[in-house]
Image (cartoon, grey):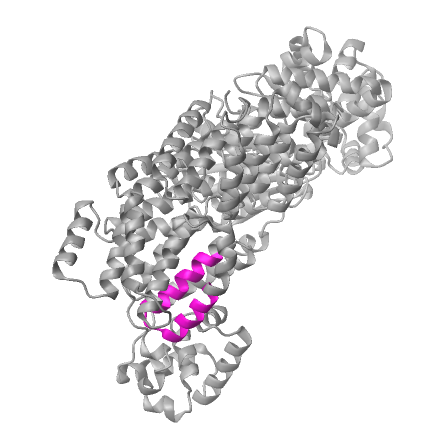
Amino acid sequence: MTPTGLSDRNSTAPRLHAGLLDRPRLSNHARDLGRYRLVVVHAPAGSGKTSLLSQWAHALRADGQPVAWYAASDRHREHLPLADCLMHSLNRLDQPDETTSSTRDEGADADMRLLARLRDAAGPAGGQIRLTIILDDFHLIEGDAETRTLTRILAAGFERLTLVVAGRNRPALPLGRYRLAGELLELSSRELQFSEDEVQSFFRSGIGQDLSHEEARILQQSTEGWAAGLRLTSLIENAPNSSFLRSAPAGSQREYAEYFLDEVIAGLPEQLCQFLELTSVLEALTPELCDAVTGLEGSAALLAQIESDQLFLTEMAGSHRWYKYHQLFREFLQARLRARAPTELPALHLRASEWFIRANMPFDAVHHAFRANRPEQAAALIEGYCTFDYLSYGRFDTYSHWMAQLPRESREARPLLMFLMVWRYINLRQFLKAEQILQTLAQGQHDRGPLGQAPEKTRMNISGRIDLMRALIGAYGGDMVAARRHIDAIPDDGLDALPFGQVDLLSIHAYVALHEGDLDRAERLTWRAHTIYDELGCHWGHVHSLCIAGISYLDRCRLADAERVLAMAMTIARQHFSDTSYMVALPSALQGQLAQMMGEAAKAEALWLAALQSENTQVPGLWERKLIPVVGLVRLYDQQGRDYEATTLLRRFHRAAIEEEDLRMEFRLSIEAADRALRGGDISAAQDGLGRVLRQESDARLRFGPDIWQIWEPFGVLLARAARAGLLGGDPEVMLTTLSETAKSQGRTASELFCRSVLAGLVAQPDHELDRLRHDIRSVGLKEAVPLPCARPAVPAAVTGAAETGLPWRLRAAGITPREMEVLMLMRSGAPNHEIGLTLGININTVKTHTKSIFAKLNVRNRTEAVVLITPLLKDAGALDLR
């Protein structure tokens, strides 16, 4: 099954028809578009926006300048972000005769892919070529997400890019900013209105009729220069016995349009009128589609006649002949159809749906099935044709929208759709919603209703899939005990043969086995899953399975194997997902760990920071994509003396875990914070942190089995350090030796070496033991034991309780307290108030109180004056800067 393709009918500028009047005051703007970053054209329907944009596009191309065109469609908004549609149009500049498949991620992720593409096409390279992107009918899709996409394009400041946006409404873009900078050209309905002279030229060139100045004035006033109104007027004026111009019409613009359209329709052959009405249910037309919908042949000839007669039909060039009615004309035709034959509408939409399926355009097919009021048909199409796109390319929002339109009985008749909705909620960490659907499934499978009959019809193992989903909730939510319990509840013969069942079981089982320390089983299962995902072309599953193998190889210290599989995962992720997506972040986090193990600190930092760019993505995914970068960066920063950065990062993600009720991440970062305090010799902070960890321990024991080494190994190291510092009882050597021997028995070489390295730092070891440790580390290619075992440097005196002895005498004389000195030093580093509060563990009001006191004591008015005053004093006193 191939991914759903975007038709190129929306990405080609309309042809310039013979009757189009050239208005130089507007068309000549094509020569000046390069002076502007943003061009906005907004006017009511039928004002000539598309015709003008088409003139610009053809003029620019004739001058050798590239133009990417996209005519927006509200149907596309249902399943594709604007960035993907613009990417399709850009790709057609390189492949004008081919249809580009849509294999993108959603939302902001798609935006970043587009920006990367534009950097290549419109960046600061030399030459006179300037890219113009023309976005027509923006009002059909305008929303917060689409406006944000355009804002990001403009904010990127591409030197060789002009963005043209046209629609019925003034877009919600920062027009004032660009107008002030001289980078905006704005054309409204007033500029697009025909002048009296242009009305005369229009009638002279269109129908060969010379209007008097008075006739032109009356017509211009009655139509307010509206292009569509003039077009309608010219058609009727050209009819025999026309006397329209003898008196001006009355009524609103809409009534005016409907009046003339009715007169035009009345003069057409009955067959043509019927064709127009029947095909008005379509947003875009081809001869083959029209044949299928009308049930008649000869649509190609009729469309050619309509185009030739210029009956409000625009042809879109491309590999197939696609047409589009003028929107007002289409609305009028639909009103006539509803009045004449309302019972025919469902059948017309149903035939359209069937044609789109044959044309491999399932999203359009689902759209028309809903319009036909056939929810069962829509549900069948979603299940039969759209599951691949949903699972492989993350079309989650589209699927959610469809599910909301389906009545309950249609959803429950197809449990696979309900399981896919559960899968969506799990990825969003909305576990309660997921569990509610699972309870409905569990109760319904024993009833006589649709759910109870589904296993017989579909041979679906509903009970097994419920356990699979609950195992997934446990693994994603951190309850590994529950995950193991539900995996074990699935029969040995596995799940059914329906899509995305058995393979997901293999994948989640591999992940749980990895956390339990059974690396052999984890690798065996993940490679089986990888083979199936590869055959299916399921890219997210492909990346996941490779990353699980990569995690195992990293802890086995099979660095060459880890490098190979993670490179494969990253290649697949970058091909099919954006650079800030979760699917790119996960292999990036693991590649950062590999770089750190090989002693490449700068590379590790870059990869980890890149992985954390996706922290606001809607899909949290596996916890490794956050845990590894956060812990790795904190320890790296400590090793390099970047204490402030380490503190801020750790506190930010610890607080986020609390807010998200992510107990696993919260507990693990609490362990890290306490361990970090011990590494830095801050006994007071270590006592507080250790107390917090021990208070959470009982809840953690219930959720994380004793074999979950990613939790209990760091916990054991913390206890050993605490025992060495005299905060707890026990023998740190015995504790760490037990941990290292357990890791060794499971083949987790990196963990074994780390525990031995910590032991060497806490308890004096004989020289031969140290030599053996160094040999073992070098023999597997490590530059460092993983994670970084080093103690962080002492915190500079200026930001500790010892600040009193390091204060310059002038600051002491001014009455600056040690706490105020801490605030001052953080001010000097550029930290805002909220970060000062986070670093010092005080609320923002207390920070403001200290700041006011500092300003009063130093007799300064603001931060800048305070920093300028204390900098030479600190240098004289030899105080350390805070990095």
> Along the line of sight, which residue is nearer the eye, 655 or 711?
711
Name the side, left or right, on which 783 lies relative to 835: left
Name the side, left or right, on which 873 lies relative to 409: left
Name the side, left or right, on which 191 lies relative to 634: right
Query: Which residue is at a point 36% across and 74% down the rendered structure image?
Result: 683
Decide whether the magenta segment is chiefly helix, strand or loop.
helix
Residue 637 is at least partly visible in this image? yes
Q: Quadrant of residue 569?
A: top left
Name the side, left or right, on which 859 lies relative to 326: left
- Reply yes or no: does residue 16 show up in magenta: no
Q: Quadrant of residue 311?
A: top right
Tell me the quadrant of the picture where the C terminus can be found. Answer: bottom left
Query: Which residue is at a point 69% across and 11% down the rendered structure image?
Result: 302
Residue 77 is at least partly visible in this image? no
Q: Position of residue 689 (x, y in %)?
A: 43, 68
> Along the line of sight, which residue is nearer the eye, 61 or 691?
691
Residue bounds of the magenta highlight: 666-693
Q: Quadrant of residue 251?
A: top right
The total number of labels drawn is: 0
Q: Position of residue 654 (x, y in %)?
A: 47, 60
Query: Which residue is at a point 54% across and 52% down the rendered structure image?
Result: 178
Residue at the outermost top position = 297
Q: Position of residue 112 (x, y in %)?
A: 46, 43
- Reply yes or no: does residue 677 show up in magenta: yes
> Along the line of sight, which residue is nearer the eye, 207 or 271?
271
Q: Position of residue 385 (x, y in %)?
A: 59, 22
> Along the line of sight, which residue is nearer the eye, 723 or 391?
723
Query: Which residue is at a point 53% across and 21% down the rendered structure image?
Result: 497
Position of residue 570 relative to residue 266, above or below, is below
